[in-house]
Amino acid sequence: MAHGDDGKDGYFPESIAADYDRSAARMFTPEALDPTLDLLAELAGKGPALEFGIGTGRVALPLRARGVDVHGIDLSRAMVARLRAKPGGEQVPVEIGDFATTRVDGGDGAGGFTLAYLVFNTIGNLLTQDAQVDCFRNAAAHLAPGGTFVVELEVPALRLLPYGQEAVPFQVSDTRWAFDRYDVATQAMSSNYFTVDPGTGQGSCWTIPFRYAWPSELDLMARIAGLRLRERWDGWTREPFTSDSRQHVSVWEKAG
């Protein structure tokens, strides 16, 4: 699904890919997915779309079912194998590689896409500012004039950090604990998951590193790549983005 440098499948090896859809089941519900598909289909229009970090096809397959010609880039062969096993998955063109630099052909050449998009915080898997800038440049290189690049990303939760604290929990249950850990000096963070089997007492842990970025920082990356901000919302339902927003969906446009 995402960029990484800790093996051929990045941060999403077989051990994670095998359980990914179940662990993210909430994101597959119509309530979560339909607003995403509505916006992306509208922006794609009649042209092809390119998903950075296509993963198991959570967005790509239903978007393709709406008539959008979806292509993808993903570093994880294990995740793409899950996509291929689903109905219609074999028909989705996917290039294995780092979405910050990998180029694909959109039919009319590498610059023929009307839409490029990157969802579910995946741009944060690029762990340096340079790599994130390269991602914007890569998106711009794939877009036709007037095309758009869409990013869904959390707003860094630093307002929840008391002085001297570096972790923010976001899931607590009898069998599962999860928290984000921040380094405000480097903008490095990680999401950390701990799960315990109540029957055996055996546990497992999974850590994904990220680099967080502010919306204004992304706007500057977009300008470097020749894109301009068109819209920014609180989420896929297009509610206004405010100082209290915990996430944003941003749309940048390539000059016509």
Image (cartoon, rainbow, N blue to C red):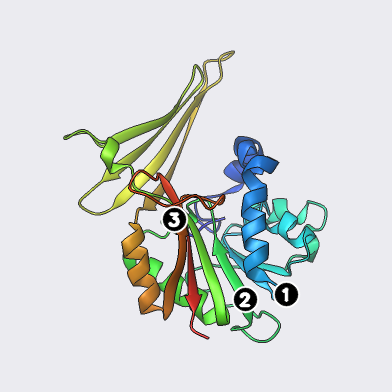
Q: Amino acid at mark 2?
A: Thr
Q: Residues within 10 Å of mark 1 (few under 14, many from 20)?
A: few
Q: Nearer the viewer, residue 50 or 14?
A: 50
Look at mark 1 in the image and give the residue it sits on.
Answer: 46
Q: Are marks 1 and 2 in contact (CB under 8 Å)?
A: yes
- From this view, report whether residue 2 is shown above or below residue 69: above
Judge depth for marks 3 and 1 and give the one in front.
Answer: 1
Residue in the picture at 39% in, 66% down: 132
Mark 3 element type: helix
Q: Secondary structure at mark 1?
A: loop
Image quadrant in which the N terminus is located? bottom right
Q: Report the front residue among 195 and 66.
A: 66
Circle 3: is it few (<14), some (14-19), or many (20+) Cα within 10 Å? Answer: many
Q: Residue furthest left?
A: 163
Residue 215 seen in the current view? yes
Please identify the quarter of the rendering in which residue 70 is found. bottom right
Query: Which label is found at residue 125?
Result: 3
Mark 1–mark 2 distance (CA, rounded to whole Å) = 8 Å
Q: Amino acid at mark 1?
A: Lys
Q: Earlier in the sequence, mark 3 or mark 2?
A: 2
The mark that comes first in sequence, 3 or 1, is 1
Q: Nearer the viewer, mark 3 or mark 2?
A: 2
First along the sequence among labels 1 and 2: 1
Residue indicated by mark 2: 114
**CA distance for labels 3 and 2:** 24 Å
Any part of residue 4 in sight: no
State the CA–CA distance, disc 3 to disc 1: 30 Å
